């Protein structure tokens, strides 16, 4: 048993005096295919548990937790000190109906003006697309989910040849993405046709 360490109660802690102590972590640096293989091995019930236990032991994680005394009781739900509501902040009732909560959240969104982002039938210049940008583009037939999916697939597959130190994705299934995008394209097409029928009726 190591020396017992008692932590300072949170109420008495002065954050300005806290210094970060860099620890040396004994863990392999994995990327690409090796990382993917390691993840699959970790997911194997018995072998994965043994590997995790070994890594915890190498880094003294179990011993550190056993020898650390935390004065506060464990918190199962985050608690925050009472504070005044910020201006222009709308409090959404957590116990309310999902539809009412979504409606309240939508009212908080700024007005969306497509004219400021789109010019006629042409795609806008470079900008960070948001959900409403995609939704407007799909409903206006400026682009389809399938076309966006193909651009993403091309981008991800292109990263394979650059050998980035940190891979963009661990798992990637181009055909599954195409399948989901096709289904989404069909749903938008059906919604547009439905709106046209309602207006014509």
Image: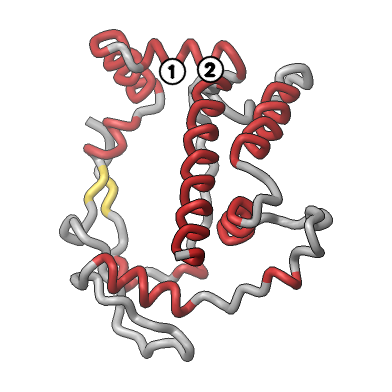
In terms of image quadrants, where is residue 146? top right
Q: Position of residue 21 (x, y in %)?
A: 52, 47
Look at 19% across and 71% down and name the residue there: 95
Look at 81% across and 55% down and name the residue there: 122
- Label 2 Cα crowd, 10 Å radius (few <14 / some 14-19 / many 20+): some
- Label 1 Cα crowd, 10 Å radius (few <14 / some 14-19 / many 20+): few
Could you tell whether 2 is left or right of 85 in the image?
left
In terms of image quadrants, where is residue 162? top right
Q: How is the image coloured?
A: secondary structure
Q: Which secondary structure, mark 1?
A: helix
Residue lying at the far front of the rendered structure: 201
| In front of the other: 17 or 25 | 25
Q: CA distance from mark 2 to mark 1?
A: 6 Å
Could you tell whether 142 is left or right of 181 in the image?
right
Q: Quadrant of the N terminus?
A: top left
Could you tell whether 33 is left or right of 82 in the image?
right
Q: Which secondary structure, mark 2?
A: helix
Mark 2–mark 1 CB contact (< 8 Å): yes
Look at 48% across and 88% down and name the residue there: 88
The residue beneath circle 1 is 39
Could you tell whether 164 is left or right of 139 in the image?
right
| In front of the other: 110 or 144 | 144
Residue lying at the far left of the rendered structure: 73
The residue beneath circle 2 is 35
| In front of the other: 79 or 59 | 79
Q: Quadrant of the C terminus?
A: bottom left
| In front of the other: 141 or 22 | 141
Decide: is 141 above or below 59.
Answer: below
């Amino acid at each position: 048993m190591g020396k017992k360490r008692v932590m300072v109660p949170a109420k008495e802690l002065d954050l300005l005096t806290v210094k970060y102590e860099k620890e040396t972590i004994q863990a392999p640096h994995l990327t690409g295919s090796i990382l993917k293989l390691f993840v699959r091995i970790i997911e194997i019930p018995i072998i994965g548990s043994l590997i995790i236990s070994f890594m915890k032991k190498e880094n003294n994680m179990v011993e550190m937790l056993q020898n650390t005394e935390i004065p506060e009781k464990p918190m199962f739900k985050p608690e925050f000190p009472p504070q005044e509501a910020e201006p222009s902040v709308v409090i959404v009732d957590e116990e309310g109906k999902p539809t009412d909560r979504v409606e309240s959240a939508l009212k908080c969104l700024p007005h969306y003006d497509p004219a400021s982002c789109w010019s006629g039938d042409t795609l806008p210049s470079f900008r960070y697309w948001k959900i409403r940008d995609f939704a407007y583009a799909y409903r206006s037939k400026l682009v389809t989910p399938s076309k966006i999916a193909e651009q993403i697939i091309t981008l991800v597959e292109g990263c394979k040849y650059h050998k980035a130190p940190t891979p963009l994705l661990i798992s990637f299934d181009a055909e599954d993405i195409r399948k989901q995008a096709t289904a989404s394209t069909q749903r938008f097409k059906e919604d547009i046709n439905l709106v046209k029928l309602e207006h014509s009726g």
